[in-house]
Image (cartoon, grey):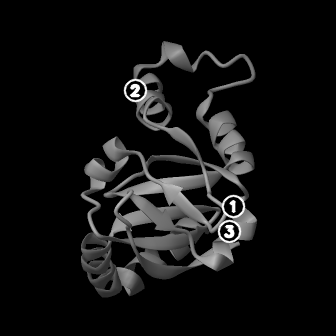
Amino acid sequence: MLIGEYIHTIDEKSRVSMPAKFRAELGKKIIITPGLGQCLFIFTIKEWEKVSKKLSSSDTDLSFLKADQRNFNRYMFGRAAEVELDSIGRVLIPEFLKERIGLKNSAAIVGVRDRVEVWNDKTWLANQKEIEKQAEALAEKIGNDAK
């Protein structure tokens, strides 16, 4: 399970080091794609296959017939990139994805169970302050939805 929050610098070649605790679970190749909110999602190849299946509407996959699903699939798949971790666990984040979330010198690398999220570190800290204020209400809502 991918959990924890880490702030890592981005080197002059646009590489960021994945936390040591994540490397074994991620494997050598990963998928990085625009996330929801102001982050990027990183999936293992195996998890990406699961996400891909869930985004198709059925076994016959006629998702291209539904405009909303077509547009969301374009968003998730069209800007996704398969990248490799180098021998010391660094990953090169494509420039167009870095620009999307305003990554410059450092990034927040966050484990969220089945994926890693990459955030502009300042955006991440602001987001967490806001969520902390809402945590109790969010827990209540999730608890009620689970009934």
Question: Would residue 20 appear left or right of 111 to someone viewing this image?
Answer: right
Counting from the top left corner in percent of width and height, residue 95 is at: 34, 45
- All told, the count of numbered labels is 3
Q: Amino acid at mark 3?
A: Arg
Question: Which quadrant would residue 57 be assigned to in this image?
Answer: top right
Quarter in which the N terminus is drawn:
bottom right
- Comparing 88 with 38, the one in front is 88
| 66 sits to left or right of 123 | right
Please state if 108 lies on the left or on the right of 57 as rendered: left
**Helix, strand, or loop for circle 2?**
helix
Q: CA distance from mark 1 to mark 3?
A: 5 Å
**Quadrant of residue 12 in the image?**
bottom left
Of 32 and 111, the residue lying toward us: 32
- For label 1, the SS is helix
> Mark 1 sits on what residue?
26
- Within 10 Å of disc 3 (Cα), the crowding (few <14, some 14-19, many 20+) is some
The local secondary structure at tag 3 comes to helix
Residue at position x 38%, y 57% in the image: 14
Q: Nearer the viewer, residue 64 or 144?
A: 64
**Distance CA(mark 2)–CA(mark 3):** 32 Å
Q: In the figure, 85 relative to 83: above or below?
A: below
Identify the mark nearer the N-term, 2 or 1: 1
Q: Say which mark, if any, is on residue 23.
A: 3
Residue contact at pointers 2 and 3, CB within 8 angstroms: no
Residue type at the position of mark 2: Asn
Residue that mark 2 sits on: 71
Q: Is label 2 in contact with label 1 (beta carbons under 8 Å)?
A: no
User: Is the Cβ of the residue at disc 1 closer than 8 Å to that at disc 3?
Assistant: yes
Counting from the top left corner in percent of width and height, residue 11 is at: 38, 66
Residue 19 x %, y %: 58, 76
